[in-house]
Structure formats: structure tokens, C-alpha cells
Amino acid sequence: MNYLKILATIASILWTGINVNAQQNPEYHLITLSSSDPDVAVPMKFYVAGVYDGRQFTNNIGTVQKGLANRQVLANFEKPFLEEITAYLTNAYPKKEGLYPVWVRINDLYVSEYTEQTEETGYASAVMDVMVKQNDSLYIEGTYGGNVESSSIDVTKFHALRIKQALNKCLGLYEVALPEEKQHEPFIEDNIKHEIPIQPAEGIYSSYLDMVKNKPIGGANYYIRQDKKDKSRYYVINRTNSMKCDNYYAYCDGENVYLNVTRLTHEKFYAKTERIANKFFIDNLAYDQNRAITQMAMYQLVGIAGWLATSDISMPVMIDCYSGQPFFLSNNGIKTLLEPEPQLLKEYKKSNKTPEDIKAVIKKYYELHNGK
């Protein structure tokens, strides 16, 4: 009897059980913006009159690391999202005589941590639309992003401060924007439900909502560069200063879409995608199994614990164009997907199971299911 196989099977079962339990009862680290951090806001020509929530993911605001083993734990606010954000912004930018009102829609807000040797780095990222009211209707004047990072021995306790700084950066960019740079786009609260175009315009996208609206930042100022050692990794480069742009949502070179996969890998790079129905297909993505529990809860994935328990750490992945949910194409995951189509399942089993083989059978599956 092969005791190693028995132990591996037991470990797989235990790991699956842990993952299932984590999906049902994820652990959260709670953050509040009403903490006694120093006031990091500066006076503006406007005050914040109201806040809307336009985020793609609404069940958490990212991840933090807990304990000596740096366990990945989901982060969330102590109070409901809009209550926390509205309380902070309306207090930091209060109504005063001589100021005009603006409204904001938060399209993205995310915190994370990364540990390297003896130092931790904490990140906060925010993207918002800033709007003004005219004739009782709101108009979007622009979309602005703010990214903040800081390092220390323990960065977890400073997430609230970094979130505030990221929000303030967004509003600061709006404050200094030139009149000719501002838009005048009618605000429709449900416009985030539109589909992402098959061929997005060339340029860089601050958030998924920019892709829905097909309104990138000028493409001429950016270009894509492939990693010399790892050909599956790409970096978006700013032409004006030759710096990497790590915190954007995606980049399109006019033909291909490159998605920022930092949230899935915790490493800063973009992955080249191919559009299959309403999914972005990535040939190969390294998946850190130590982050599996957190990622499943973050993206509200149900029933995939068994797929990843015994899978390789690198595999093709599909990302839903609208929801952003990842679907890791492990061997078991593909079999589950293809189960309703026996001929395709048979074709997959007979193939060499290369990314090209997987891509071909996935395309056929979505053709049979009208892209759904």
C-alpha cells in the first residue's frame, strides 16, 4: 500500500474542507474611517454632497495579512460601505459658504499588503467619478484614480489612513484639472451594467467602468512591454517618464487587452488576454495556493475548492468581462465545465491539454451555449 498516496489524499480532502468552510464563513479584518488618524484632507473649492457605490466587487475591500504566518484575510469596513465613505468625505470636505457641491461615485476601492524579508508594504487604491449637478441632473466631470503605498514593520493598522489619502488624491486631481480636460457626461446610476465592447479603444483604463464606457486615458502616452525572462508578463510603461504603471485596471494596444492580475497573483504585472464570448482568456497564470481561501471568498466563488486542491499552481484562467470573477481552468474545473457536453469532454481528455487545446475546446463550448 502506498502510504504517500494515502497521505496526499487525506491532505487533499482536508484542504477541500478548509476551503469550503472558508467560502461559507470567511474571516474579515474590519477597518473604520472614523479612527483618530491625522486629518489628511486639504481645503478645496468644493464640498462633497453625496456618494454613490459603483464598485465591481461589493463584498469586501481587499485583503490584509494576519499573524506570524501572514495569513491572507479579507478586509471590510466596520459599517456599511456607503456609510463609512460618506461620513469621511462629507466631514473632510464639509459644506461651507463659497464652495460648490460635488457628488462622487466610487468605482474601485481596494487595500492589500505584501511582505518582503523584514518589511511590509501596505497599498490602497481608489477610483472615483466626480460629478456636478445642473438642472437637477448629475453630470460626470471626470474619472480620477489615487494610489498610496507605505512601508513599516506592521502596515495593517494604517489602512484607514491610506484609504483616506487615496480618496483625497482623487479629489485633488479633480481640483487641479483644467476646464478643457473635464467631461460633461450624464450620470446614469445603472450604466455600469452595460457590456464591455468586443474591441475596446486604445489606451489605459483606470477601472472596469472605464472599459464599460470605452473611455480610456490617451493611448499615445503609454505602451506595453513584455518581460524579457517571463514572456507571460507584461508591463504598461508611461512614455513621458519611462515608469511602470502598476495600478491601472487594463491596457489596450488597439488590438489586445492586457489585464492587471495583481489581485490574483499579488505580483505587479499585466497578462495578455483573448476574448472568448464575454470572458477574457489568459493562457497561463501562476496561482498562489496559499491565497486560495482568500481569493475564493473575495470573488464569491462557490464549489471550486476541490478543483484547486490538487491542481498545478499555473493554469489557464478566464475572467468574466463584466463581473471580473476568475474561473481557474484546472483539470477538474474544465471537466466540470464540459460535463454537459460529452463530445467536448471527450475531445479535451484526448488532447495534450496545452493552453491552445484548452482554448479551442472552451471556444467550442461557448459557441454551443451562445456565449453564456
Image: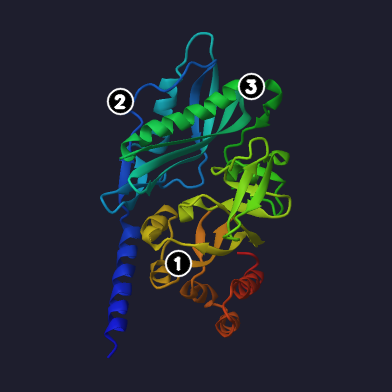
Amino acid identity at mark 3: Gln
Mark 2, secondary structure of its residue: loop
Callout 1 environment at 10 Å: few (<14), some (14 to 19), or many (20+)? some
The mark nearer the N terminus, 3 or 1, is 3
Callout 2 environment at 10 Å: few (<14), some (14 to 19), or many (20+)? few
Residue depicted at x 64% and y 64%: 371
> Left or right of 160: which side holds 358?
right
Residue 134: which numbered mark, if any? Answer: 3
Residue designated by label 1:
313
Residue designated by label 2:
36
Mark 3, secondary structure of its residue: strand
Please tell me whether residue 2 is drawn above or below residue 83 in the rendered image. below
Residue depicted at x 67% and y 70%: 367
Viewer-side label of 3, 1: 1
Report, in whole angstroms, how far the alpha carbon at label 1 lies from the one at label 2. Answer: 42 Å
Q: Residue 322: in sight, yes or no?
A: no
Amino acid identity at mark 2: Ser
Please tell me whether residue 128 is drawn above or below residue 290 in the rendered image. above
Viewer-side label of 3, 2: 2
